[in-house]
Image: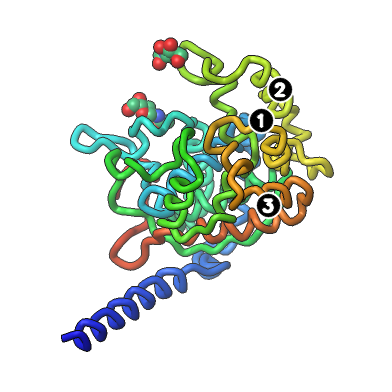
Amino acid sequence: MALVYKTNLSLLLLSLFLTFNLASAQLRRNFYAGSCPNVEQIVRNAVQKKAQQSIITIPATLRLYFHDCFVNGCDASVMIASTDSNKAERDHEDNISLAGDGFDTVNKAKEALDAVPNCRNKVSCADILTMATRDVVNIAGGPKYDVELGRLDGLSSTAASVEGNLPHPTAGVNQLTSLFAKNGLSLNDMIALSGFAHCTKVFNRIYSFNKTTKVDPTINKEFVTELKRSCPQDIDPNVVINIDPTPRQFDNVYYKNLQQGKGLFTSDQVLFTDRRSKPTVDLWASNAQLFNQAFVNSMIKLGRVGVKTGSDGNIRRDCGAFN
Ligand SMILES: *[C@@H]1O[C@H](CO)[C@@H](O)[C@H](O)[C@H]1NC(C)=O
Ligand SMILES: *[C@@H]1O[C@H](CO)[C@@H](O)[C@H](O)[C@H]1NC(C)=O
């Protein structure tokens, strides 16, 4: 009996292992080399144009990607619009920091791809979002890295699936760690991704909180002034687009702020007060290069979360609606 149980367990583990490996083995660089060889350049041009029109493109796209991958995997399920019969992921109340510019970035890149006959409906919205996110990181002065491609778009998107899957501002290290672990991400991944572009999380809260109130009233007023200085709303687009030797937005200032007790939310500040994460915060506050490397590794790992392949997905004709 015990032996049978053990055999079944190892078979189960083996098949889980194989499933996992097959899913990530499907992802590769240059996935579209045969079908749409210029995919990266086309997406990059569209993202760059969009970022020139609105600087919010940068934090909005990053936020959209993070939200997408954490809920149901990186499958563009966050892009789906609600219908009468289905309340979609993006309409859960945790969408507070999702800005229209993120959705628009993906849609614009998709339009640009669809205008090229051989690329039309060949590239998944999930991959477009992955490339666009890489591009905004770089446009904001962050590292440039190669992305793995070959994701399919998911076949379901529900507001209910968001529940408990996104980090909350009040979360402690234990809660945050288990949320990341659920997605195969480590403590270091959590610290790296929490700090990604320190303006990302605050942008909406200091400029466009909701329809009637610009600034989130829960943020200390003096701190708002400081945040506005480091995350200006109307940066000259040319400055952002140029390869800037002193990155304006993507940097390790987040970790330096944590050292000074300037974490915006509990979930930020605990990274410095908890002895498990403090050494990493100190290291990245003092070494931007190490942070950049760690950030890239964590973004690539994030891109492998819950990837859909085979009959679990398809390539959407419209990123906002199922085929
Ligand atoms: C967020 O959800 C609200 C409430 O359902 C909805 O009105 C709003 O359009 C959503 N925001 C985005 C960016 O989808
Ligand atoms: C916007 O936020 C403020 C402060 O939390 C709140 O008082 C107000 O009712 C909100 N307005 C809308 C339209 O949600």
Answer left or right for 40 relative to 242: left
Q: Do the residues labelled 1 and 3 touch (CB within 8 Å)?
A: no
- Residue 270 x/y as whole percent: 57, 40
Which residue was labeled with disc 3? Answer: 279
Asked whether mark 1 lies closer than 8 Å to ligand 2, one says no
Which residue was labeled with disc 1? Answer: 262
> Mark 1, mark 3: which one is toward the viewer?
3
Answer left or right for 293 relative to 191: right
Q: Residue furthest left?
A: 1
Q: Reading the chain from its start, which is encountered first: label 1 or label 3? A: 1
CA distance for labels 1 and 3: 17 Å
Q: Residue 137 carries which label?
A: none
Q: How crowded is mark 1: few (under 14 residues within 10 Å), some or many (20 or more)?
A: some
Up the image or down, 312 lies above or below 47; here it is: below
Q: Reading the chain from its start, which is encountered first: label 2 or label 3? A: 2
Nearer-the-camera pick, 195 or 103: 195
> Mark 2, mark 3: which one is toward the viewer?
3
Q: Residue furthest top?
A: 212
Q: What residue type is labelled 3?
A: Pro
Q: Residues within 10 Å of mark 3 (few under 14, many from 20)?
A: few
Q: Which colour scheme is used?
A: rainbow
Which residue was labeled with disc 2? Answer: 226
Asked whether mark 2 lies closer than 8 Å to ligand 2, one says no
CA distance for labels 1 and 2: 10 Å
Q: Which amino acid does label 1 sit on?
A: Lys
Q: What residue type is labelled 2?
A: Glu
Q: Do the residues labelled 1 and 2 touch (CB within 8 Å)?
A: yes
Instruction: Let me know if residue 118 appears in the view.
Output: no
